[in-house]
Amino acid sequence: MSDHFDSDFADAVLGWYAGAARSLPWREPGCGAWGVMVSEFMLQQTPVARVLAAWPHWLARWPTPAALAAEPAGEAVRAWGRLGYPRRALRLHAAAVAICTRHGGDVPLDPALLRELPGVGDYTAAAVAAFAGGARVAVLDTNVRRVYARVYDGVEDAGLGAPTVAERARALARVPDPPGDFSVAVMELGALVCTARAPRCDSCPVARSCRWLAAGQPPSGRARRTQAYAGTDREVRGRLLAVLRERAGSVAASELDLAWPDATQRRRALAGLVADGLAEHTNDGRYRLPA
């Protein structure tokens, strides 16, 4: 377990990244902090390919936080489309409003200020500060934590739960000064090579120093969980939201009835959408996206 700067690891990962990095629009030099923030919200639990299709349209419509904040939250939900977990759209809209009211419309690059924004946790704050502002911070997503767990701790993954204070301290100690592309390089290594399933150890730039590989790749012993979708309330919510997104105004309850046959499950899912702020029940008994 390393708690100090490892120059060999940093050099190897940065050298690999220079030739293997994917060309993603939010990594381009002119993207800006807002573009990075939008990408980070979208990439939460959503594959890169789907975000690549949605991100340019979002930035074309709302190139600044002020542009998004000026529109109703429901428009953010509508534009979110089928990215999944649509509460992220509400939180991103709320973050845009907060950026305008607290920071004059400019995304702050201080991790502490970023964490004060709606929907921004430790990871997102560190990612925006590092990728948009060049800050030397510990960016710990699932991919990064897996790389560190395998290379330094000799275990398959970092386990369940949020990173501990000690884990964050060890991760920060590994970041070069200046950090350059280090944080995104480790993340890319975890996404493309040191994957959760079928890691490509023969292509890994740090394979020789990986304790997990040296130990014979011992499994964690935890069963991998797959999240069900078909037939769940999540699917029903998605069906109902799809109807609301397709209408410019409000929708009669009878139209929503057609979206899912089970009335009990449909009512439960609709009540959940209203409770989460993703839909509104109007005075005349109809439903709409939040105003």
Image (cartoon, helix red, strand yellow):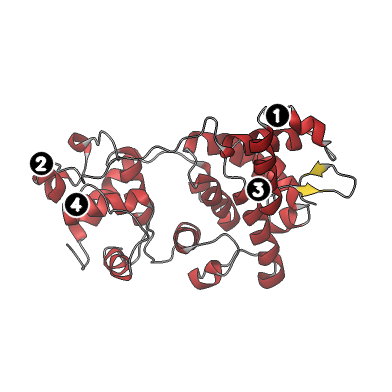
Residue 73 seen in the figure: yes
Residue 216 — which label?
Answer: 2
Q: Which is in the foreground here, disc 4 or disc 3?
A: 3
Q: Which residue, given by chain and number where applicable, does mark 1 sit on?
A: 259
Q: Position of residue 168 (x, y in %)?
A: 32, 66
Residue 291 vs 256, above or below: the answer is below
CA gap, disc 1 and disc 3: 16 Å
Q: Secondary structure at mark 1?
A: loop
Give the mark nearer the N terminus: 2 vs 3. Answer: 2
Q: Secondary structure at mark 4?
A: helix
Q: Which is in the foreground here, disc 4 or disc 2?
A: 2
Give the mark nearer the N terminus: 1 vs 3. Answer: 1
Q: Residue at x 16, y 44 (%)?
A: 207
CA gap, disc 4 and disc 1: 48 Å
The amino acid at mark 2 is Gly
Binning the other alpha carbons within 10 Å of mark 4 as few (below 14), some (14 to 19) or many (20 upward) gives many
Q: Residue at x 36, y 50 (%)?
A: 142
Q: Secondary structure at mark 2?
A: loop
Binning the other alpha carbons within 10 Å of mark 2 as few (below 14), some (14 to 19) or many (20 upward) gives few
Q: Which residue, given by chain and number where applicable, does mark 3 sit on?
A: 272
Q: Which residue, given by chain and number where applicable, does mark 4 sit on?
A: 151
Q: Position of residue 148 (x, y in %)?
A: 25, 54
